[in-house]
Image (spheres, rainbow, N blue to C red):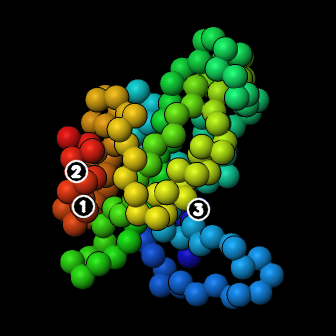
Amino acid sequence: MDLFDNKKNSGFTILSGKTDVHGGFGQGVLDLNAVSSVIIDGEEAYIDMGALHAKSVVEKGIKWTTNKEEVPNGKPYWLVWVTVDRKEAGPYYAGATACYMEIDREARRGYKLLVDHVNRMDYSMKRRIMLSELDDTSKKALKKLLIDNNETMWQNSSDELKEALA
């Protein structure tokens, strides 16, 4: 399954069924087939699979720093890792975690903590919901995207996710 395949589908990657990974060299390899990345820009949320490699539209061409003070005119963005899974009732949003970043497009500088982004991707893959840092506008944008993308997946999702975005 190609993560960058732009067919007319839901945009979120559904499990491909391939869950076995060989146990030899590189046995710690992660299968990212179930993970999608969402960028929240103000009142808008959209899927941008480039974020899996720190190459989303907003991240391209940015020199990153871990010092927020080096990006005084940064605009806040959220990267949300969304993991999907299947259960008896059908596919659902199983994990969702948010990561903060600030980007000054004009200065081509940005602030983010890469280790936090990696850890939160891992937490999402472990079916955790970590969205409490999102403001109300961001929560509303993410909820709208998830529902508009696939209302059945939203209905099949946990009460924890729904409450986190209430």
Q: Are marks 2 and 3 in contact (CB under 8 Å)?
A: no
Q: What x and y, as percent, mark residue 98?
A: 46, 43
Seen at 73% across and 28% down, the residue is 65
Helix, strand or loop at disc 3? loop
User: Label 2 neighbourhood size at 10 Å, few (<14), some (14-19), many (20+)?
Assistant: few
* Residue 29 occupies quadrant: bottom right
Question: Sequence order check: which comes first, mark 2 or mark 3?
Answer: 3
The amino acid on which the numbered mark 3 sits, given as a three-letter code, is Phe
Q: Are marks 1 and 2 in contact (CB under 8 Å)?
A: yes
Residue 158 got which mark? 1
Left or right: 97, with 111 as reference point: left
Q: Above or below — where is 151 with respect to 41? A: below
Q: What x and y, as percent, mark residue 133?
A: 40, 34
Give the distance between the C-alpha atoms of the residues marked 1 and 2, in whole angstroms. Answer: 7 Å
Seen at 60% across and 34% down, the residue is 58
Residue 162 got which mark? 2
Helix, strand or loop at disc 1? loop
Seen at 35% across and 38% down, the residue is 132
Residue 4 got which mark? 3
Give the distance between the C-alpha atoms of the residues marked 2 and 3, in whole angstroms. Answer: 28 Å
Question: Sequence order check: which comes first, mark 3 or mark 1?
Answer: 3
Give the distance between the C-alpha atoms of the residues marked 3 and 1, in whole angstroms. Answer: 27 Å
The amino acid on which the numbered mark 1 sits, given as a three-letter code, is Ser
Helix, strand or loop at disc 2? helix
